Image (cartoon, rainbow, N blue to C red):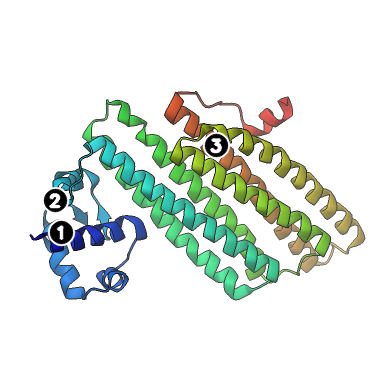
Amino acid sequence: MNSKSNSTLKAVLDVILHENPATQDEIAEKLGLSRRYVTKLLQPMVKRGVVRRAYILDLKKFDEFSDMFHEKSSREHAGSYLIKEMLSNMAEHVTKQLDASFQSFEIYDKELANKALEMDYISNNMHEKVRSSVDTVISINPYSEFSKTMVFSEVAYDLERIADHTCHIANFVVKGCYEVEEEMMDILRSMFKTSKKMLNYSMKAFLDEELDLKDKVMDYEEKIHDLQRKALNKMAILMAEDDIVDKDRSTYYLSLSKVVKAFERIGDISVEIVDAAGEFYRNIPRTTTPEHFRRLAR
């Protein structure tokens, strides 16, 4: 295979790894290639087990071909790098899902809310690809220090949980609840911005080993719980003034409480991610005390 074909094959494999294509047509469209040429490049990779059906890379097999692409890293290092790239892409996607969910909530747009919910399928697929890749890498040498790669799978699961919580925000709109009173919306805007910052800082801490960011995450944790209390107090006032015997209004407050809880859970899961970074890089044990009791102890 000549160098031009090598570089094109590497580009195809990068699309499979980072962009989760569902078909060869999608790969071809992204790279401006013909489907026939993509098929020709992938056929030997599929036969050798480098690419599995549903377009998942087997990292163990991929390493055998690293010289073809002038990759000099070891199996373990290559595996770690690739999975971190997958987690980085997943974090970016989940952040976009959070953005779309809250935007649909803020402007009360059902079409956008449905699009945000559809993004959750991709989040689930990305989690599965990370989990599968981690299993493959660990099988190379399950007794080495690299067995810490299991933490990658945990972080991917945390990101999937965050994606699931964003669905409560979009579902508020899809279910046709009432638009939110402006003072309440201001509190929820602050919760959204705070939870998004916590997610971004925690993933940067994990991906880039910037463990000092934990202080910022913990500061924002205090803020988001203060905002949660304000939101619940505001809801209590509105409920006292409203006719919650009405079924629609009762459903409204129930759905709104799920939105408030979603932001709080995104913040708590972000704390779990930054704790995982400390364990991964510095062997700092994660606490086994539930988050609720940790807050009470402060």
Q: Residues within 10 Å of mark 2 (few under 14, many from 20)?
A: some
The numbered dot on residue 6 is 1
Distance CA(mark 3)–CA(mark 2): 39 Å
Residue at x-position 49% and y-position 33%? 276
Question: SS of the residue at dot 1?
Answer: helix
**Quadrant location of residue 272?**
top right
Figure quadrant of the C terminus: top right
Q: Residues within 10 Å of mark 3 (few under 14, many from 20)?
A: some
64 sits left or right of 163 in the view? left
Residue 169: x, y in percent? 64, 60
Residue 96: x, y in percent? 53, 60
Figure quadrant of the N terminus: bottom left
Instruction: Say whether disc 3 or disc 2 marks the residue closer to the N-terminus.
Output: 2
- Residue wearing tag 2: 68
Question: SS of the residue at dot 2?
Answer: helix
Up the image or down, 283 lies above or below 242; here it is: above
Q: Are marks 1 and 2 in contact (CB under 8 Å)?
A: yes
- Residue wearing tag 3: 272
Residue at x-position 27% and y-position 55%? 56
Q: Which amino acid does label 1 sit on?
A: Asn
Front residue of this view, candidates 167 and 16: 16
Residue 171 seen in the figure: no
Distance CA(mark 3)–CA(mark 1): 40 Å
155 sits left or right of 55 in the view? right
